[in-house]
Image (cartoon, helix red, strand yellow):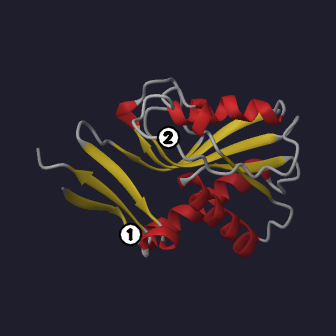
Amino acid sequence: MSQKILLNAAQLDMILHRLACQLIENHSDFKNTVLIGVQPRGAFLLRRLEKVLKEHYQIQNLQTGLLDITFYRDDFRRGEEPLKANSTEIHFIIENKDVVIVDDVLYTGRSINAALTALQSFGRPKTVELLTLIDRRFSRHLPIQPDYNGRQVDAIGNQKVKVHWKENADEDAVYLLKSED
């Protein structure tokens, strides 16, 4: 499998700051806004955004949570092995809040559809927005588009986008992988 680097650590950091500034423009003090990361990979992006917002832009009252969508997916019964669920950590009410769903890569839209369904268990938000690090534009199965995205990537066919974070892969980088078929 060959790989091409799409974003290095410096570029990733710049994108995180740009996304944080876009969120601040639209949500100012975050008094009525919550950020919810889709488990497992959206959690890494959420934690990084949270750090940037708090440390660099002094956003203090930021509420964040993690959402497990495992049993809300439309394909959860199709695998050969039993699924391993992640934990949902939402310790606040989302009723009438502005919710920003955070995930690393938007591909078919099915994970975000599952996240929207799972969110209903926690109340009825005032609004829901989507923030993704990477938007794979040409692979959508559902009409779901990000409100905030770090970079659009035109990955097709046998190409895959892989996000590495220091926390889980010892580096900050985004790669485009292509199988040698």
Q: What residue type is labelled 1?
A: Asn
Asked if residue 63 lies left or right of residue 15, the reply is right
The label shown at residue 8 is 1
Asked if residue 69 lies left or right of residue 14, the reply is right
The label shown at residue 35 is none
Q: Residues within 10 Å of mark 1 (few under 14, many from 20)?
A: some
Number of callouts = 2
* Farthest residue, direction front: 81
Q: SS for tag 2?
A: loop
**Whole-percent x, y for residue 141 in the image:** 43, 24
The residue located at (52%, 72%) in the rendering is 167
Q: SS for tag 1?
A: loop
Precedes in sequence: disc 2 or disc 1: 1
The CA span between labels 2 and 1 is 35 Å
In the rendered image of this protein, does residue 139 appear above or below residue 159? above
Instruction: Give the residue at mark 2.
Output: 82
**Whole-percent x, y for residue 27 in the image:** 78, 50
The residue located at (49%, 28%) in the rendering is 77
Q: How crowded is mark 2: few (under 14 residues within 10 Å), some or many (20 or more)?
A: few
The residue located at (29%, 54%) in the rendering is 176
The quadrant in which residue 112 appears is: top right
In the rendered image of this protein, does residue 36 appear above or below residue 95? below
Circle 2 or circle 1, nearest the eye: 2
Q: Quadrant of the N terminus?
A: bottom left
Asked if residue 116 lies left or right of residue 106, the reply is right
